[in-house]
Image: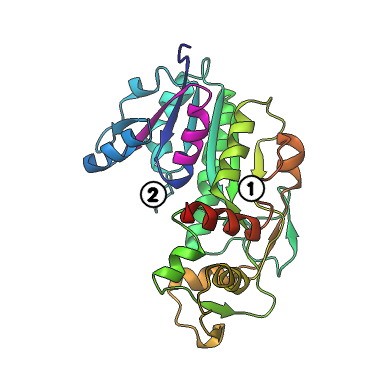
Amino acid sequence: MTISQQLFCFGFGYTAKALGRRLAEDRWRITGTTRLSDKADAIRAENAEPVLWDSAFDPAWLDDAAAILISTPPGEDGCPAFKAASGAIAERRQHIKWVGYLSTNGVYGDHDGAWVDETSELRATSARGRRRIAAENAWRRLAADHNLPLIVFRLPGIYGPGRSAFDAIRARTAKRIYKEGQVFSRMHVDDIASALAASLNLPRRHDVYNLADDEPAPPQNVITYACGLSGAPPPPLIPISDADLSPMAKSFYADNKRVSNIRMKQALNIQLAYPTYREGLEAILKTEKV
């Protein structure tokens, strides 16, 4: 079968790799950027083509792209992919059928534990959250001006093989920090890849989706469950007032919300393989024991 479709990834991190593996099954050609030449072999190991983006962006890299995934985080001066390639993407709008921007549910800020959906107010107060809102808005303006098929995906905490509570337990960095009423939303990386792939193959019904599993949960519960599965003793429960948290970790705990995935499931017609962290952790442990 001839490979006739290319996904170009700005950044080739954990989520992009999972999506690339999923699309490779359907004979997509995957290209991923890297700033470091020594990462090229790792990209090739994923059956993807590396592009060394260590200086100016070459618009010709996009010539064969049918779809574009943007996962590069914004800095103080904005989204690097937008600065480098927004013009080139707009010029190629006739043959680009999908542009996915990976944002974060951190744009919602704090909602005191209430449910949020795609229509909820964006209350982010942290610099990181505000940069995400600005990046979303820049891409959405570009899409509106040039009729680009952009979809913004607001991601939760991402976990999966090699990036789960088991890894923290083995590294002895796992903590059970307790804050009254605190919950976080999360999603297994394979379910994220399934949602992105479904979006690629379906008519666009919305321009923004929350990605999350079915059960926002206290973070200490995830560690406790992983310890129970692996037989490791759970670390002590620490009140947040006594926890030695980094500034970034403190900012995460400052926001409390439950992220609704109803639009994602209905519009993209997907069924989660791991509807809660329990199924996800159980599957990861089985894989590690093989």
Regarding mark 1 in the picture, which secondary structure is present there?
loop
Front residue of this view, candidates 230 and 70: 230
How dense is the environment of label 1, judged by Cα within 10 Å: few (below 14), some, or many (20 and up)?
many
Residue placed furthest toward the top: 2
Q: Is residue 70 left or right of residue 106?
A: left
Residue underneath mark 1: 211
Residue placed furthest toward the front: 290
Depth check, mark 1 against mark 2: the one in front is 1
> How many numbered markers are drawn?
2
Residue 21 highlighted magenta (yes or no)? yes
Q: Which residues are magenta?
A: 17-33
Does residue 231 lie above or below 132 as drawn? below
Q: Which mark is residue 77?
A: 2
Residue at x 66% of width, y 46% of height: 273
Callout 1–callout 2 Cβ contact below 8 Å: no
Regarding mark 2 in the picture, which secondary structure is present there?
loop
Q: CA distance from mark 1 to mark 2?
A: 26 Å
* Residue 194 screen position, x and y as percent: 60, 38
Q: Amino acid at mark 2?
A: Asp
Residue 122 highlighted magenta (yes or no)? no
Q: Earlier in the sequence, mark 1 or mark 2?
A: 2
